[in-house]
Amino acid sequence: MTTLKRVLTWREGAGMTIAGVLGSGILILPTLTAQLAGPAAIIAWLVMTLMAIPMAETFGKLAIYRPDAGGIASYARLAFGPKAGKIVGILYLGTVPVAAPAAALIGAGYLGALCHWSPADVVFVAAGLLATALLVNYFGIQFSGWAATAVVVAISGLLLIAVLSALPHVSTRAFVPFLPHGWWPVGESVALLYWAFVGWEMIGHLSEEFINPVRDIPRALMVAVAVVGILYLAVSSVSIGTMAYRMHSHGAGLSVLIGMELGRMGAIITAVIALLITYGTMHTYIAGFSRLVYAQARTGDLPRFFAHLHPTRRTPARVFAALLLPDAVVLGSVLVFHTSLAQLIAWPSAVFIVLYLVAMLAAWRLLPGFSARLLALLGALISALALIFVGWAMILPIALAFLGWWLKGPRVEKAIPPEEIA
């Protein structure tokens, strides 16, 4: 049977992980969280940055323990039985088909603001970004990894320019009063920031394609956590310190931040950053999601039609083709019904929080050693606390979970005890 290629090293793994985590959230969430919680939003960023460490380490341990393209669905199946794996696979259907178009719209929106495009033009450019990401992924995971690494290097350099150019405008007075709206908006910001910190799980979907997963996955995640944490904290700190979030009502505070010192050139740099970041996010989302669907089809949880790899490139080409439909539906809803980006972000974010909670609980059951289980328990606690602030968006993961349960039928399978796992 045709299998996925083992061609990834820690460099491509780090590049794809950073590209997936350092997503479109950095373009809008420093502004949105500061508008919500005031200067205290920095607490939410710091909490999520610190919590990324145990979550990333746990996902790395799971990927080594079970190198399987199914990722969280595979871990849930091992820990809690086939029904759980089926439900997690269905939950994933509420993430990337919505999140990838949302990311594309954010990047296209920045470019549209620079070029004074109409909403229809922005949607069409977003469609072009999605099509490019699908096409590059079609050519194979090694080519995809090289592209993601190049994008990450460019993003990091441009964001460093943005932070350094804004530093002269930072004032300590911008942090007073520190808690203008109380602590509740800080909690809401933590829940919102899940959009900015999801992506660690993608290493699991790609684990079958690492040459040496035991050596390279921990290295890739260590580099990714360091780069993402530094960039997120730097951008959010200067966004608050310069009060850039008060100068733009639509969340695009990064353009204000860079424009403070660089003027028109800053607007161009912002547009380039936006396009690179959103492309990197879509690129990795699509790569991981396609492997998840392939793995679920391989086990029979999704139609066997998708358990097919391209004979020479060994990529799940049928999944890429199938993604065209939901992408078109989401972009069409924005074009026709003017669906807001806030709505597009909130719904898949709620699903991601639930998926992370399941992954941490699975890790607590599967992984040997006290420290590994403690890290998993900490990650589960953070995910559970974030669910408190999700609100109405919780409807989507509940509905998808019921759908997964119904599709599996009423029979209850016995979970596989950890000691019996080969």
Image (cartoon, grey):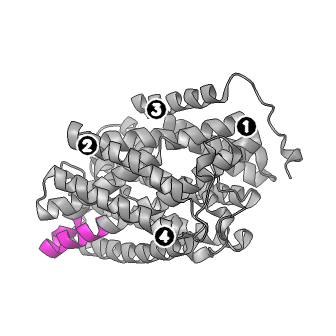
- Looking at this view, name the residue that lies furthest to the right: 420
Q: Does the magenta stretch include residue 270?
A: yes
Looking at marks 4 and 1 on the same chain, the residue that comes earlier in the sequence is marked by 1
Which residue is painted at 81% across and 53% down in the image?
A: 369
Identify the element where label 2 is drawn: helix
Identify the element where label 1 is drawn: helix
Q: Which of 250 and 104 is in front in this view?
A: 104
* Above or below: residue 189 compared with residue 197: above
Which residue is painted at 75% across and 37% down in the image?
A: 81
Identify the element where label 3 is drawn: helix
Q: Which of 363 and 385 is in front in this view?
A: 363
Is residue 397 visible in the rendered image? The answer is yes
Residue type beneath disc 1: Pro
| Gap between marks 2 and 4 measured at Cα | 33 Å
Looking at marks 2 and 3 on the same chain, the residue that comes earlier in the sequence is marked by 2
- Chief SS of the magenta region: helix
Q: Which mark is residue 334?
A: 2
Task: Report which residue position mark 1 lands on.
Answer: 82
Task: Report which residue position mark 3 lands on.
Answer: 396
- Mark 4 burial class by Cα count in 10 Å: few <14, some 14-19, many 20+: some
Q: Which picture quadrant has residue 23?
A: bottom left
Looking at marks 3 and 4 on the same chain, the residue that comes earlier in the sequence is marked by 4
Q: Which picture quadrant has residue 415?
A: top right
Residue type beneath disc 3: Leu
| Gap between marks 3 and 4 measured at Cα | 32 Å
Task: Report which residue position mark 4 lands on.
Answer: 227
- Mark 2 burial class by Cα count in 10 Å: few <14, some 14-19, many 20+: many
Instruction: Write the start and end of the magenta stretch as one range.
Output: 256-274
Is residue 248 visible in the rendered image? The answer is no
Identify the element where label 4 is drawn: helix
Which residue is painted at 59% across and 48% down in the image?
A: 305
Looking at marks 1 and 2 on the same chain, the residue that comes earlier in the sequence is marked by 1
